[in-house]
Amino acid sequence: MKIINARLRHSDALYTLECEQGVFTRIQQQVGPEQSKCDLDAQQKLLCAPFVEPHIHLDAVLTAGEPRWNKSGTLFEGIECWAERKQMLTHEDVQQRVRKAAELLISHGVQHIRTHVDVTDPELTALKAIVPLKETLAPYLDLQIVAFPQEGILSYPNGKALMEQALDIGADVIGGIPHFEFTREYGVESMRWVIELAQQHNKLVDVHCDEIDDEQSRFLEVLATAALESGLGDRVTASHTVAMHSYNNAYCSKLFRLLKMSGINFVSCPTENIHLQGRFDTFPKRRGITRVKELRNAGINVALAQDSIQDPWYSLGNGKLLRQVDFALHACHMMGYDDFSQALDFITDNGAKVMHIQDQYGIEVGKPANFIVLNGRDDVEVIREQADVLYSVRRGEVLVERQPAMVKMGVNLA
């Protein structure tokens, strides 16, 4: 496959890229626009690595309103609604919804997904349905599965045994939810246990950590300390961490030292947490997004994700990760030119680091020929225009091709 007239990130030049047997074999700068024979003319649009969705719940997608709506809009009622819907799960139901969501994500340039799958279910119905889809979806995307204890590890009957069983079935990553455990002591113990389990099985860790507006919810320091002491470091991810929004600055200053030492990753889900957090406030209402800008500026890896697509926690969602970037830039006061010029990192390279796929990710000779072409000339134009994905290519094969929208103006104001 030969691609011409492509712009690469942080460069004003045009490039020709070639790939053979699904791998990039040549990337060369052009003198100017070319009209040579090719398989794909990028037409001077931005070519970059595929989008990465590092935090979504595929087991719950497309279940909003089933069996009832989350009327309070809180995380906790969402968990109650899901507990009711969970009893209705079947193998066919789960697989059908996951396939629909996967198709939506693929259409918007996503080729790498980490999904959290609820394992607080004695039958592990969703997990058993999703694990086989890893192979089915492999030609189109990479799928990592987190064993996620939605109702707690120590606070749910046989929680530890279910987590271990999930690993036997095929989960790739170990999850946790310490702020939802019955007591702080349970939460601390669960974090220590999760890290020990990851060491035993050589697994990654991704914890729903402090997803609550309680400024006293401080399990992040427990997780980071365990990651540091165990040596797992960047194999550990803290997702959400919205309580950090409410921490005082003196405590955060102390905390950031530990976070940098630990090397752990962060994932923020802007639209979801803007919606869920602040529900118990009058005014002023907290918006509840973790300190994305401050973490980034401290050199800590932060990725963005959408978390949900039409489920009990978030009844919207459309698979467009650029929407998450847009919300984060606004809500986190990242509206400068420099912020725009590196914003795509949040849904590309940073997500790849979370998933630990850097060795197979990126626009480099020798790496898999996976890429997207966006309808913009550079990062800033893509962000401003919320640009469409014109092409999504995986191992040199086109998965998605989209024609730019055509607009006919009935007026001329020039």
Image (cartoon, grey):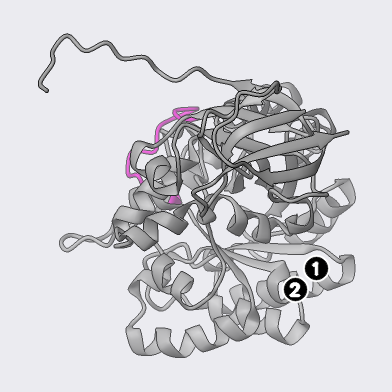
Vertical placement of residue 271 versus 66, above or below: below
Disc marking residue 195? 2
Q: Nearer the viewer, residue 313 or 56?
A: 56
Residue 19: percent from left, percent from top:
80, 36
> CA separation, marks 2 and 1?
5 Å
Quarter of the N terminus within the rendering: top right
Residue at image point 40% right, 32% down:
69
Quarter of the figure with residue 182 = bottom right
**Residue 62 falls within the magenta-colored stretch:** no
Residue 317: percent from left, percent from top:
45, 34
Q: Nearer the viewer, residue 353 or 89?
A: 353
* Amino acid type at image mark 1: Ala
Residue at image point 77% right, 31% down:
396
Quarter of the figure with residue 386 = top left
* Dot 2: element: helix
User: Is the residue under label 1 in contact with that under label 2 (CB below 8 Å)?
Assistant: yes
* Amino acid type at image mark 2: Ile
Disc marking residue 408? none
Q: Is residue 210 left or right of residue 47?
A: left
**Residue 75 falls within the magenta-colored stretch:** yes
Q: Nearer the viewer, residue 200 or 154?
A: 200
* Dot 1: element: helix
Dot 2 alpha-carbon crowd within 10 angstroms: few under 14, some 14 to 19, many 20 or more: many
Residue 22: percent from left, percent from top:
83, 35
| Residue 77 visible from this viewpoint | no
Quarter of the C terminus within the rendering: top left
Q: Which residues are magenta?
A: 64-77
Q: Nearer the viewer, residue 396 or 172?
A: 396
Dot 1 alpha-carbon crowd within 10 angstroms: few under 14, some 14 to 19, many 20 or more: many
For disc 1, the marked residue is 198
